Image (tube, helix red, strand yellow):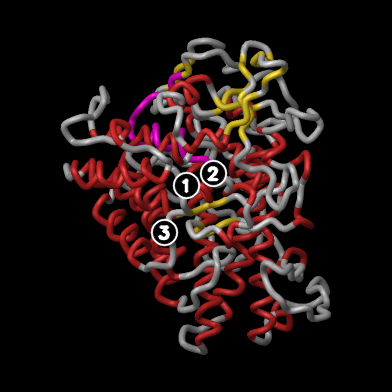
Amino acid sequence: MKTFNIKRYILVAVLLTSISACEKNLQPYDSKSNEVALTTPDDIQIATYGNYSMLVAENYTRHLLTLNEWPGDNVVQSGADGDQASLGASYQHIPGMYPTRDFWAQSYKLIYSTNLIIERIKDGESPKLDQLKGENLYLRAMAHFNLVRLFGRPYPQGDGNNPGIPIKKDLKVDDFPARNSVKEVYDFVIADLLKAASLMKDSKNANFASKEVAEALLSRVYLFKKDNANAIIYADKVINSNRYSLASTAVYKKSPTLVPESNPETIFNIRHTISDNKDKNSVGSLYYNDPATLSTGWGEYYASQAYMDLLDQNPQDARHAFITIHYINGVLQYRGTSPVYFINKYNWQEGIANLASPVYLRLAEMYLNKAEANAKLGNNQLAIADVNIIRERAGLSGAALYTVSDLKGRGSVLDVVLEERRLELAFEGQRSGDLFRNNLPLVRAYPGLHGTDNFNFRVEPTDPRVVYYIPEREININPNLTQNP
């Protein structure tokens, strides 16, 4: 694994209005030693802003979303393109592809930079420093968890005993760590998040980590680990904090256009300001192209026909607002064999076509985490109640709601929950993981550029390709890294 010098990579964050109103004239840290660069609490604050800014980089945000979302069945690749993340969509990925290479490198760059700050702060020095240490512990945990999801097998396969990713919790440079097990990575992430939650006291907005942000990620991690009791406990902590509320149906429908800290539902997002706009290199550009001009993006990945069929079971479902169907003179348009169902969930923030601040954690997921965990614990009524909370927010009522005695043809309460997760969390990087960690296959019985079969494509949860290869560059550098089969 390649390591990184903090002199090169901790840069002064551009203190945008969403991050800080401070407008100090600050020098870059490039030429300063680590000891000098992080002398005062203000230095550590600025370096922490720099760590948040690493998430905004294309090498992080775009790859995090595409590498997780495209292998699912909510999105369809309509034709050939130049983005190697499409190799993940077709399950034909290779060790040398640049999205996994760059995401791995950016992740460990972030981890190293958080370690520098974590190591510099002793617990209890001051409330401000405790807060900053907690924020960096959260970022370190988040980075490790996102890595193990891509490169380590789902936790339920082998109870976490499969190879994961190297844990980095020190400042050693030029070392060659081996892969820790998936279980070891999960345990490390949980420990970091618990410590982070205990240290953070400030109720910052959704652009920053806070106690509730750490607790929200704990709920997700515990759910993925099959620790259903704790998944419920930490979801309830977030819900009962009263810091967040589900957006109204009207606000929810226009949520992509809002700055996320103005959305009462957002727990944590990767904040992009106007100056961070990646335009046609953004995730939104991959999903959307303004039908009026066909000039704003590439628009080559659409909502799948299977997803649209599910959504269309209830025409009044507010989640239709995140789909823009491309018609010309009333005729549905196609690219190849795929109908053009543009996805606009990452578009039009502040009126800019491809600007978005991807939401990483939000309140709706907490209800759905509880619902899935309760379904697995046999608490069917509790699970259905939380599913209906999400459906009611989506504008559904009456016969569109579930009861324990009326699952509307679904085989089990768990099936109901997973289907609702599919609808609500669509295009947010959850779907393929939801399938494989629940030992369910990916089935694409609809047209698209799937790989070996463009009309009937199936991937079993035990298939080697449900996780990505360790990047070839890292294997070449580090003799202690083993490759995924």
Q: Is residue 368 magenta?
A: no
Mark 3 and mark 2 lie on one chain; the one further toward the N terminus is 3
Q: Which residues are magenta?
A: 428-443
Residue that badge 2 annotates: 253
Q: Do the residues under discs 2 and 1 have CB atoms within 8 angstroms?
A: yes
Q: Nearer the viewer, residue 445 or 145?
A: 445
The reply, left or right, for residue 292 in relation to residue 79 is right
Q: Amino acid at mark 1?
A: Thr
State the residue at coordinates (59%, 44%): 64
Dot 3, how many residues are within 10 Å of its Cα: few (below 14), some (14-19), or many (20+)? Answer: many
Q: Is residue 415 visible?
A: no
Instruction: Evaluate whether residue 27 shows in this view.
Output: yes
For numbered disc 3, what is the local secondary structure? helix
Query: What x and y, as percent, mark residue 476?
Result: 66, 41
Spatial separation of the CA atoms under disc 3 and disc 2: 23 Å
Residue on which the image places disc 3: 216
Could you say which is closer to the camera, residue 3 or residue 275?
275
Q: Which residue is mark 1?
A: 249
**Quadrant of residue 116 in the image?**
bottom right
**Which label sits in the foreground, 3 or 1?**
1
Q: Give the CA distance from mark 2 to mark 1.
A: 6 Å
Q: Is residue 373 left or right of residue 221?
A: left
Percent position of residue 152, x then y: 46, 41
Query: Mark 3 and mark 1: span between their CA atoms?
Result: 22 Å
Which three-letter amino acid code belongs to the residue tagged 3?
A: Ala
Check disc 1: other Cα within 10 Å, few if <14, some if 14-19, many if 20+: some
Q: Secondary structure at mark 2?
A: helix
Up/down of 388 relative to 173, above or below: above
Q: Amino acid at mark 2?
A: Lys
Q: Residue at x 23, y 41 (%)?
A: 375
Q: Residue at x 47, y 83 (%)?
A: 123
